[in-house]
Amino acid sequence: MYQTTYHRPSSLSEATSLLASASEAKLLAGGQTLIPTMKQRLAAPSNLIDLGRLDELKGITVSGGTVTIGAGTTHYAVSTSADVKSAIPALAKLASGIGDPHVRYAGTIGGSVANDDPAADYPSAVLGLGATVVTNKREIAADDFFLGMFTTALEEDEIIVKFVFPVPTKAAYAKFANPASRYAMAGVFVAVTSGGVRVAVTGAGSNGVFRWADAERALAANFSASALDGLTVDSSELLSDIHGDAAYRANLVKVMGKRAVTAAG
Amino acid sequence: MGVEGIGARVTRKEDKRFITGKGRYTDDIALKDMTQAVFVRSPHAHAKILSIDVSKAKAAPGVVDVLTGADLAGDKIGGLICGWMIHSKDGTPMKAGAHPAIAFDKVRHVGDQVAVVIAETKNQARDAAELVEVEYEVLPAIIDLAGATAPGAPQVHAEAPNNLIYDWEIGDKAATDAALASAARIVTMDIVNNRLSPNPMEPRSAIGSYDEAEEHFTLYNTTQNPHVARLVLSAFVGIAPEHKLRVVAPDVGGGFGAKIFIYPEETVALWASKRIGGRPVKWTADRTEAFLTDCHGRDHVTHAEMGFDANNKIVGFRVHTIANLGAYMSTFSSSVPTYLYATLLSGQYDIPAIHANVEAVYTNTVPVDAYRGAGRPEATYLLERMMETAARELGEDPVELRRKNFITSFPHQTPVIMCYDAGDYEAHMSKALEASDYAGFAARKAESAARGKLRGIGLSCYIEACGIAPSQAVGSLGAGVGLWESAEVRVNPVGSIEILTGSHSHGQGHETTFAQLVNERLGVGINNIQIVHGDTDKVQFGMGTYGSRSGAVGMSAIVKALDKVEAKAKKIAAHLMEASEADIVIENGELKVAGTDKKLPFFQVALAAYTAHNLPAGMEPGLKEGAFYDPSNFTFPSGTYVCEVEVDPETGKVEIMQFVAADDFGNIINPMIVEGQVHGGLAQGIGQALLEGVSYDTESGQLLTGSYMDYTMPRADDVPSFNVMHTKTVCPGNPLGMKGCGEAGAIGSPPAVINAITNAIGVRDISMPATPAKVWAAIHGNA
Ligand SMILES: Cc1cc2nc3c(=O)[nH]c(=O)nc-3n(C[C@H](O)[C@H](O)[C@H](O)COP(=O)(O)OP(=O)(O)OC[C@H]3O[C@@H](n4cnc5c(N)ncnc54)[C@H](O)[C@@H]3O)c2cc1C
């Protein structure tokens, strides 16, 4: 790890001004992605701003048909929250399948979504449920947030504060884990929302998480696994690596899509 | 059987310190004024080094020195060696290129070391390492072993034209050709044995420390064989004479073969300590460095033909294997695809004629050497895939085809050197078939099919040869060392005992099992017995631990030393009790005069030996004896493994529904520890079959599996709850009747898994690791 200066702001506004003033600064949440990257010397922020102590970024509240989750809420907290389990069980289940217990105790939803790893689980829920990303500056609709692998609409001085998830009629997430990393090789989040059926796919796309429009149309007409039978997934936009080529991932997207629909009931 | 004696399930004495974090590993050691070393490593698979500029690095904060291959050569430090000479079939010796501890003219694999930075802290050394400027001329690289000898392939070492290290053969070619020519049926297979990374939990580490006043070196090192390390570093590398070099292997967190070898890093740490005036130099690999520099295992491609007569009896077996030894020949690499591999090609079967031809090649990859099983997994995989495939193609049940060809009388001389001493292959096969309810498979398959799943079952009947010996024989085959073991039994005046063993424990549980042996013999409680190992200053010369030798060879040496201790103790007891020596028996820690109530506790005899107030006339005081034991033969563990899988045809994911392992290890000292060894071996074998595989970019030679994000280590939920059991034929070759058990699981399991998968999905072959993507492609005909 390179030398870095560690800051621990005690309020969101202090964090915001630190981020604006410090040079080459990076936000630190659970550190589950950032710290290993720094140890491997692939990231070298001069200033590290720890969001870990900000109560403003924590907590889960349910009201008026939405579930609001602070950016600093850990995967463990989401996966065990009675509120999340009853309002959007698919989200709790997704969180319970991230990494291992160590990772779930430390890693946060904000860190995961801000990082936008193409194989991360959470982006599929944010996109699949049509959540709103609330930052220290503005509100961003999920459809405008994810711009490609490790690329989001977040600006340099922007901090995610919370996520507002509309409670769907039903939803489910099916993941096929990469045998080595256990991130998603294909993770499909299916939701029936007030705005219609949404299907978001993570792990497979070469531009990160994406909505599977054909599946959304087919499921809007007939919400059953068999509705996806006739679809083919275009493999030209999918990832290929030592764990599976694009054709395999295209198959997984379909299989996981069907399993998610079945699980959603 | 006593509660702590042979056969007892004693919990491991060493576990308290391991489980409570009190183990003392090389990296835990902090010496006064210690410095930290970081290596500058090649980013290229193959390149000429045009220049190295260390000036900026030397000027960086905290840097003590920066050393290169030129400095090493200037100090006349020799290269690393391969200690087993193989001759090609034309009689020429193997063609080994130089293996400098720091490259100076060329780099030959990604990760090859080009300089070392020594600094006050590791972070300073890392910072400075980035300032070392190396100018390379990148050369085309040869990565794929199958193309290594092709005309025009990039040349790794000038000494080995066409990258061919040796072209070796074993067996009777003419007889094998004739047998195949007359065969009623020939089954042909092309088999790949995938390349593996060993991944011990503790990465390699070394501390070199030079004492200027004494001109004496100390090396703390993650090694499985400290004396062998000292011998090589002294006699061949030329660091210091043996009496001026102490090698300490403290707690070592797993080895699996990878810590047998003498590597560049420990060589450099020792030499560098002298260069910088005697301050100790520590190096510890990080995990990525471990992937880039620990010797890999396996990596064969093989073409094989097996001939059968009209009754499906094997008449001949012809094998051609290309073995990848990587960019340099590691310490024992040459022996692995030859004498540790092709000598096992007869398996459990009576095969009248076998011929194997092995070509070993250089490539621009990490060196390949022994990894748990070393050669025997490759032989077993080939043979057991062949038997399964032959059964299918000959229309015979795989069990019956094996049974029909089993060796049933012993000793049995195979056509490939080995003389099997004892075994009962039918016994473990029937036991495994019964335990797995082999007969009920069809019903289970139907039940799976009803759920849309494909179920398959596969067998593997393995034999392996471990406790490699005797020294004279291995010497005649090219080994540079003997393969005996040493022991010393030191009885203290109070009757507690220290056992000094030349073998080394890095997870095997010697501190427990060796103590159980002593308890069985002398009745001393195992908590009054200390097993001392891993320090050349404490322990007499010994050969270390690998190849499942510590029980069969290491404990046999202890037996011989105990025989001498017992004989002397009996003499003393007879003298003290005024009885005849022949009447003294040892029972429950007491020396008794048979048929009387006269007895002396063992500790009183020990005390008498040391007070020497009243010893038989002419007897030397003390009670301490040593022994060297050179076995008369290998031991031949064997077993039958049954694996049953269920495949999800939609995703290609394989789930192991049951795994039965019936092994014959002869007499067993501690069944719990043996089961643990088998469990670990099975996890590694299943890892090879389903999950693990080193992958390189074949153009650039970059390692694609350089972390656990991409290299799939088996985890608890990847393996089933194993059903492990034993049959027994006693090994006639050693005093305890034991066979090795450390590698069997890794040797026997991969073909059982692949036989089950190919059975489930109805394909002839699928390459390891059978990842979901591969299995799915095979099912859907896209393979
Ligand atoms: C062994 C292991 C296994 C894993 N397995 C999985 C898995 O199966 N599935 C999966 O999805 N993930 C997995 N992860 C990743 C894990 O979910 C991480 O927690 C997550 O990617 C990052 O969250 P974090 O809180 O640790 O963020 P950090 O590592 O602290 O930060 C990550 C990035 O997000 C930025 N950031 C953090 N918080 C904010 C914020 N509030 N606003 C703006 N930017 C912010 C940081 O600056 C940094 O760039 C795994 C990680 C590990 C170590």
Image: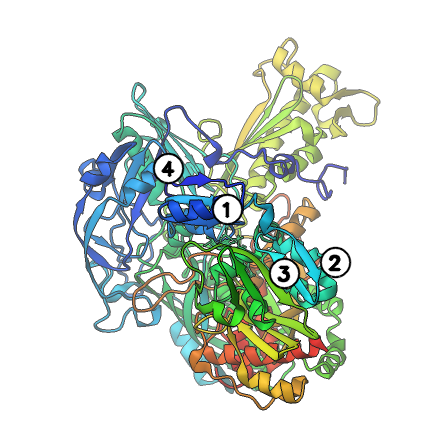
Relative horizontal placement of residue B774, taking residue B454 as reference (left or right): left
Amino acid type for the residue under numbered disc 2: Ala
Looking at the image, is mark 4 or mark 3 nearer the viewer?
3
Quarter where residue B577 is shown: top right
Question: Which residue appears at 48% of the width and 67% of the height?
Answer: A145
Q: Which residue is mark 2?
A: A82
The first of marks 3 and 1 along the sequence is 1
Looking at the image, is mark 3 or mark 1 nearer the viewer?
1
Secondary structure state at the residue bearing disc 1: helix
Foreground residue among B720 and B388:
B720
Quarter where residue B610 is shown: top right
**Same chain for the residues under marks 3 and 2 in the image:** yes
Up the image or down, B17 lies above or below B451; here it is above
Q: In the rendered view of the protein, which quadrant contains the N terminus of chain B?
A: top right
The CA distance from mark 2 to mark 4 is 46 Å
Taking the image as drawn, is residue B42 in sight?
yes
Secondary structure state at the residue bearing disc 3: helix
Residue projecting furthest to the top: B613
Amino acid type for the residue under numbered disc 4: Lys
